[in-house]
Amino acid sequence: MLSLSHLGYDSSGFSWIIESDRTNVVQTMYQLQVSLHQDFTSSFYDTGEISSCSSVCVPAVGLDLPSSETVYWRVKVWDNHDEDSGWSDPQVIITNPNQKEWKAKFITPETSEDASLAKGKLLRKEFDIDSEITRATVYATALGIYELHINGQRVGDALLTPGWTEYEERLLYQTWDVTALLKKGKNAVGAVLGSGWYKGDLAGWLGRRNIYGDRNAFFMQLDIRYENDKKQVEITNDNWKHSDGPIIFSELYHGETYDAREEKHGWNTADYNDNSWTKAEVLDVDYKKLAPQDGQLVKRQDILPVKEIIVTPEGETVLDFGQNLVGWVRFTVSGKKGDTVKLRHAEVLDHNGNFYTANMRDARNEILYMLKGDKNEVFEPHFTFQGFRYVSVDEWPGTINPEDFKAVVIHSDMNRVGEFECSHELLNKLHHNILWGLKGNFVDIPTDCPQRDERLGWTGDAQVFARTSTYLMDTRTFFIKWLRDLRISQKESGAVPHVVPDILSGKFTEDDVNENVDSVSGWGDAAVICPWAMWLAYGDKKALGECYESMKAWVDFIRNRATDGLIWNTDFQLGDWVALDAKEGSYFGATATDLIATAYYAKSTEILAKTAEILGFYDDKVSYESLLKNIKDAYAKEFFSHTGRLVSPTQTAHILSLAFDMTPEDYKKRTIQGLLKLIEDNDGHLTTGFLGTPYFCQVLADNGCLKNAYDLLLKEDYPSWLYQITKGATTVWEHWDGIKPDGSMWSDKMNSFNHYAYGSVGEFLYRVVAGIDTDLERTGYKHIVIKPQPGGGITHTRAKVLTPYGDASIKWDIKNSVFSLNAVIPHNSSATITMPDGTKNDVGSGAYSFSCKIDQ
């Protein structure tokens, strides 16, 4: 029987997954309808029967959605077995207002004298509804962070809205159906407003706040529809009132101070007496910057109990939640009015077992709560988040009971798509740590770290992890959102800043007057590598096309900076960041930065040429293929001796030369041998940093050194991925030696224990150990490559990826020198299954089993 599931719509088009009890199912036709009526008594858009196997990001050519409406869509498909799915259940789209329909104003409860304050402010207004309504939709955003309430209830479950974008040009608004929250008669709408990224402390080591403005503001438009087509619009304007509330202080880095004695009961309900409240002021803000929500909202994802209560040698009472996470603590407390709760947060304990916060730098990460005196008061913060495993309970009325505390895990609301498990338990823990590193750092933007006074969207970290992220979570729209801000922040020259949103340009060095210092190899390449990673995983042509001009601008920027347009050796570079082969006290690694920069230049040029071909820009394809050839020729002359020796004798130089196909064919054998020698010289260990590590195991596997790849992956002593786990890590560290073998810390200055760059090895776990990949010619798993490459003594592996077509899964095991494989291929997709003995099987959708003899 043919049916449909996982129906979705966004800016890239319509998508659905085919379910069937048959094998080798391929969609042959579809029909798509869009209507104003849920029963589809009429449709204003109907494709008719379209001969196509497309079921992912299907564009609706000619569809013009009406503004400010609730519309419905449905789809019907046919397959190659002459079955049809019947019409899907109606799916809802709440469309966005056009710019002319905005009537609301931005209103502020602050004056410029409040620039240094971080209070939570309350805003409210009452209004009447005189008859039964059919639909009510609210659109809201803020300069700051807001929570919206209607008639005493919180609207939606999103957190930290509207998130972080390039506010000066793009401010997202959120849309909710609030029909069920309104009533006939008097109604009240209210908002709580906090500093957030807009006005609060950012990049704490630079001492910067009020980066985007010094006054928070709120914006809301509520569209109400009645049965007789009558409309009512409630908006933010100078009829609103504001007051201080119980949030005395709230900052993203520093935590929150909440005085429950100052709560204003009923403030968000009708008939509340607000005579003492102050009239709000209207701010002039351009509507052009308003844009609909285009990434996943941040939400609560999990609740973790206290694993253990510890009393440290210094006498601190510390809660251990057993997992380094991002979010906050929800607690239940009883006591007298005015009693205080004080919590501090940390990722690790020091080598003596004491609470360790030095690596937080200037981020205080404190929660202060003053009780109102009720029984069982429940509290969780509003406009802050912490990165932590441990919580020091510095003040608490009464006995500390573990059941009174819960850790609330938050991150962008991405669906989990990947599962991995094998016979090597530490490797399973590594996968766990990589996943939790993603969770902790994908809080609206891809941050470098979630705990210290930084938490910025570093482009280099994002690009090395992008492909791994797609194996773990559905990160397509997450990256679509962030890449739109990257394009806004990109300079006219094509330069891409270190962080997006960009708050560092012109601030990275004390005497910086040259924008090129704010754009470096491996970081700026996020403009090219991240869109390409999304293309590989999702096959979203529209999203790739959105990025094309930005990709071109980046490559052309390098060409204009490079010597003779070929060797990029003219600018400051970050190099192989925090590589272990760096000089004492240096972060930059020993690999020649011009080699790294030129290798990445070539890689981005290669991707750009392929993208041009995909999008039909054939003149560009030819032009950039020619440029690529010239870069490679220049690279060979500049960085290889005439006998094939690399002039930069580092692991990363060898890795990038092989991974990016920069090694002349005659020199490949020597380059591979050179890499193996460098591993041997370091007792079988890596010495690579952010740019060399992601490709290390894959390069070895791709060049006939699979055993060496597994040896490297499965090392347990320092430095290695598994070493961190032996030291108790539950996320991936920023430094290989974040905690040294003797238990001491690498440094207080820059030592995150939740930093996903080295977690990029997760791609290797799925592609090589499990053996699931997408075909480079039929991306988005339209054709799946199943090619497990067992090694390292691993006797079984199980993995699953929810692809855009459905679940692709693999289970393999080895017994008595027989390799047995079971694979499931989703419908409307196909696969090539390659066994370890080299035999290949081309299959359609369905479940398959194969076996072969192997050497052990």
Image (tube, helix red, strand yellow):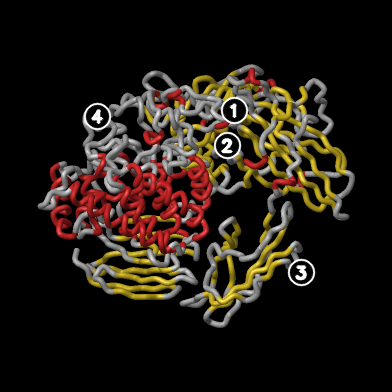
Query: Residue extending furthest front?
Result: 564
Q: Which residue is mark 2?
A: 167
Quarter residue 234 falls in:
top right
- Circle 1: residue type: Gly
Q: Secondary structure at mark 2?
A: loop
Q: Secondary structure at mark 4?
A: loop
> Residue, x 22% and y 46% (percent of image)?
653
**Labels 1 and 2 touching (C-beta < 8 A):** yes
Give the mark, 4 or 2, whose residue is nearer the N terminus. Answer: 2
Q: Relative to 497, is 816 on the left or the right? A: left
In this orientation, does residue 714 appear?
A: yes
Camera-side residue of 382 and 614: 614
- Vertically, is 577 above or below 772? above
- Circle 2: residue type: Tyr
Q: Which residue is mark 4?
A: 742
Cα distance between the residues tagged 1 and 2:
10 Å
Camera-side residue of 209 and 22: 209
**Which callout, 3 or 1, points to the residue nearer the camera?**
1
Give the mark, 3 or 1, whose residue is nearer the N terminus. Answer: 3
Q: Secondary structure at mark 3?
A: loop
Give the mark, 3 or 2, whose residue is nearer the N terminus. Answer: 3
Q: Which residue is mark 3?
A: 42
Quarter residue 846 falls in:
bottom left
Q: Which residue is mark 1?
A: 213
**Which callout, 4 or 2, points to the residue nearer the camera?**
2
